Image (spheres, rainbow, N blue to C red):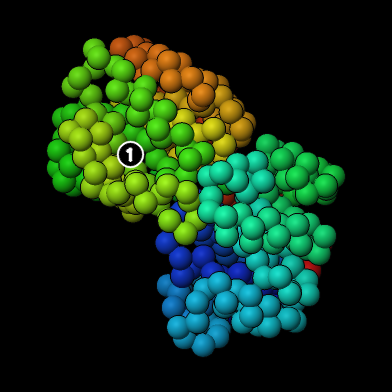
Amino acid sequence: MSQGDGRAGRAVYINGKFSAQRTTGVQRYAAHIVRALDQQAPSAVGLRLVLLCPPQATLPALQHIEVRRVGPAQLPLHLWEQTVLPFAARSGLLLNLAGSAPLLSARQCVTLHDAAVFDHPEAYTGVFVTWYRALFRHHATHAHKIFTVSRFSRARLAARLCLAPEDIGVVHNGGGHLDAVLADDRILDLHGLRGCRYLLAVGSASATKNIDRLEQAFASLSTATDVRLVIVGGGNAQVFVGSAAQEPGFDTTRVLRTGPLDDAPLKALYQHAQALVFPSVYEGFGLPPLEAMSCACPVAAARAASMPEVCGEAALYFDPLSVQDIANALQRLLSEPQLRHRLAAAGPAQAARFSWQEAALELRGHIGALA
């Protein structure tokens, strides 16, 4: 456990709930922002950062940020966040990075990654929508600062929460976090993908990920019977409507669902795929395209939501609501090696435009003014 660089300085407590959760997009965001903040020695600018974690958390190895386990063991994470966390952070500013936050914290900043519970409530369970809509509205009027991860999300949150866009700070995701990961090629042998042509899709079981249309488009490719579609991601029946249907290990010979994967096997899939296909109709940011680009994997993405903002000119775009347009993009990816080469070459530079270090510097500037 790191004890930080001293006790002096304005206290900023970080919600460490993410350290006890399975890693999805918002948990990855929180973890990488915290690591980047730690590398920047926040005590040098008069801030004392303290990561407050549930007892069951896996504690990150940090050098400058103090890490504490707080609260009783076996307390559900939701109750820990709503009761233990605000009490433990009562003497400073609480920084929430992974979407959720306590209702009763006296001083806090909240990161809302998207406005999907307002824009696409059909993708979530009724309980989830009701709770998070209420939570978001509360934070819009009570939080010291609202952050989000893209200009697209800023516009949607401002519209839904009746805020001025300039009152919402944008602290984007980063790219390149897979650079130091050693790819685990055993995933190829495990699923019979060694030497096989396959297209890759990465995302949860949310309806906004648009996997159904992707599968329909893939099934229509009668001239590509040797190609497989590999779908990586998990589901949560308490969050997503219909997520229970997305079962890990499901394999129809041409369509394979692996379930969630760690970074090492995921990187191997990126490196050997013909392309990543990202058909989401709605994303607050959309991290998988940047991950793929950093691995020089060609990317085809929906021209929707935040994707053009994130992917720039380094992706092949399609209409996510048109099965035929998705199919046309898949066909081009499989039949035009020069297109794949161009996209693969453009990807790393686009991913490099989004840095966790720059995101942490932006965030540090905001919290330094508020703490």
- Residue appearing at x 18%, y 22% in the figure: 226
Residue depicted at 25% across the width and 14% down the height: 222
Total numbered circles = 1
Along the line of sight, which residue is nearer the eye, 233 or 52? 233
Q: Please give the residue where the numbered disc 1 appears in the rendered image.
A: 231
Quadrant the C terminus occupies: bottom right
Mark 1, secondary structure of its residue: strand
Asked which quadrant contains residue 360, the reply is bottom right
Q: Residue at the far front: name it.
A: 126
Pinpoint residue 346: horizontal percent, then vertical percent.
47, 24
Front position in the image: 209 or 124 = 124
- Near-viewer residue (145 or 46): 145
What residue is rendered at 75% in x and 57% in y? 137
Can see residue 222? yes
261 relative to 282 in the view: left or right: left
Give residue 349's position: percent from left, percent from top.
51, 30
Give neighbour class at mark 1: few <14, some 14-19, many 20+ (Cα, 10 Å): many
How far from the left and from the top, in percent, is residue 297?
Answer: 37, 30
Amino acid type assigned to the residue bearing label 1 in the image: Ile
Q: Residue, x 48% and y 51% (percent of image)?
A: 240
Q: Is residue 277 visible?
A: no
324 left or right, relative to 150? left
Q: On screen, 151 above or below 97?
A: above
**Residue 8 picture location, percent across and down:** 72, 81
